[in-house]
Amino acid sequence: MKTMRCFYRHKGGAAAVEFAIVAPLFLLIVLTLIAYGIYLSAAHSLQQLTADAARTAVAGLSDQERAQLVNNYIEISTMNDPLIDRKKLVVTVATDPKNANQFTVTTEYDASALPIWKLYTFPLPSTTIRRFATIRMGGI
């Protein structure tokens, strides 16, 4: 009984034990936040790239010219983006089938190389990021 009282009196290692219990969970949450931040940053970069490419394509007079303007813009723009690899990016430019006065630029990016896919315990988004931007041609 005397040893139990002595055990309860010495609390010098309590902080180390609490840290050993809490630290792995804290590190898992921090690394998950970083991985999701990288994924969301890549998705945002892709959306901005798609919207800017669609704005660039307004100058095109035909579908082929618009597609050429979009591909030129994306080739120039993705050279300095660390999150988007041009080889994994698929771009399509098409006139909207429901409205001939609109065209849509669609991008699909294979994001399987991002570090988020190494997390096994959390629900994960799709490995393919899809974004689109629709531009109206002409007046009202």
Image (cartoon, grey):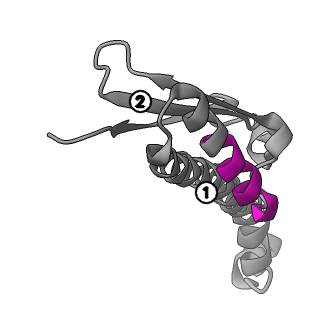
**Viewer-side residue, 97 vs 43:** 97
Q: Position of residue 8 (x, y in %)?
A: 70, 76
Image quadrant where residue 25 sits: bottom right
34, above or below 50, in the image: below
* Type of the residue with mark 1: Ser
Q: How many residues crowd mark 2 within 10 Å: few (<14), some (14–19), many (20+)?
A: many
Identify the residue position indicated by label 1 in the image: 41
46, above or below 105, in the image: below
Q: Main secondary structure of the magenta part?
A: helix
What's the distance in space between the residues labelled 2 and 1, CA to CA?
26 Å
**Viewer-side residue, 112 vs 57:** 57
Q: Which residue is depicted at the point 45% across and 50% down? A: 55
Residue 112's disc number: none
Residue 130 visible in the picture = no
112, above or below 42, in the image: above
Q: Position of residue 131 (x, y in %)?
A: 52, 36
Element type at marker 1?
helix
Image quadrant where residue 95 sits: top left
Q: Which residue is depicted at the point 68% across and 60% down? A: 34
Q: How many residues crowd mark 1 within 10 Å: few (<14), some (14–19), many (20+)?
A: few
**Viewer-side residue, 57 vs 47:** 57
Quadrant of the snapshot with the C terminus:
top left
> With 111 as the anchor, is 58 left or right in this view?
left
Image quadrant where residue 14 sits: bottom right
User: Hey, which residue is sitting farthest top in the picture?
Assistant: 97
Asked whether residue 82 is drawn in magenta, I would say no
Query: Magenta stretch?
Result: 70-81
**Viewer-side residue, 123 vs 57:** 57
Identify the residue position indicated by label 2 in the image: 103
Residue 74 visible in the picture = yes
> With 59 as the anchor, is 137 left or right in this view?
left
